[in-house]
Image (cartoon, rainbow, N blue to C red):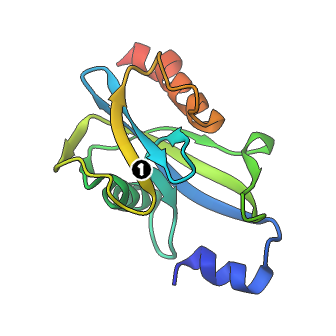
């Protein structure tokens, strides 16, 4: 059982601070988006398990959601605060602290055939699908405006 599921059994839907990682995987100027099970687009990533580093969380989640092995992760930024407080569809309340990484080094055959991923595609980061979730738009825009210009 995952750490979060175990804690949720004890506290129900009460607010919980969660830590996770997302990754901007870049290929020829495009970024990999994941169509999540709710039908919205976002970046591959997820929540930390006990004993993991943020980098290991990023690698594990990307593999689980995309079948890609990633390397050479570069930390873009840490995100937290009032803009990262959410109530999920199941009424769980979360306050997320997220490490966002970038890489253009990956191996494997892209495959999103799992319960968390409906589709995967590389897209122009300046032309995101309209149903891209706000937090991921923020991460990608920060990458374009603050990080990419210095690479």
Q: Quadrant of the C terminus?
A: top left
Q: Is residue 94 left or right of residue 102?
A: right
Between 18 and 108, the one nearer to me in the picture: 108
In the image, residue 21 lies at what x, y percent?
A: 50, 52
Residue 108 appears left or right of 85: left
Q: Residue at x 52, y 76 (%)?
A: 50
Q: Residue at x 58, y 49 (%)?
A: 98
SS at mark 1 in the image: strand
Q: Position of residue 46 (x, y in %)?
A: 50, 57
Q: For mark 1, what is the residue?
A: 118
> 27 or 49: nearer the eye?
27
Q: Nearer the viewer, residue 71 or 39?
A: 39
Residue at 27 percent of width and 34 percent of height: 104
Image coordinates of residue 18 in percent, x first then y, are 65, 62
Q: Residue at x 46, y 22 (%)?
A: 147
Q: Local crowd at mark 1 within 10 Å, few (<14), some, or many (≥20)? A: some
**Is 80 situated above or below 123?**
below
Q: Is residue 144 left or right of residue 112?
A: right
Q: Nearer the viewer, residue 19 or 46?
A: 46
Using the image, determine if residue 58 lies above or below residue 141: below
Task: Residue 100 in the image: state x and y as whole percent.
Answer: 50, 42
Q: Tell whether 86 sits left or right of 144.
A: right
């Amino acid at each position: 059982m995952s750490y979060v599921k175990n804690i949720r059994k004890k506290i129900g839907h009460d607010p919980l601070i969660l830590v996770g990682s997302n990754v901007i995987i870049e290929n020829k100027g495009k970024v990999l988006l994941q169509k999540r099970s709710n039908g919205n687009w976002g970046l591959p990533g997820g929540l930390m398990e006990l004993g993991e580093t943020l980098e290991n969380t990023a690698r594990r989640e990307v593999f689980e959601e995309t079948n890609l092995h990633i390397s050479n992760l570069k930390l873009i930024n840490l995100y937290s605060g009032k803009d990262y407080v959410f109530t999920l569809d199941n009424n769980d309340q979360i306050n997320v602290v997220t490490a966002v990484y970038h890489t253009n080094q990956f191996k494997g055959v892209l495959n999103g055939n799992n319960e968390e991923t409906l589709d995967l595609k590389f897209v122009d980061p300046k032309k995101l699908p309209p149903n891209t979730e706000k937090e991921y738009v923020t991460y990608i825009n920060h990458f374009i405006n603050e990080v990419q210009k210095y690479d």
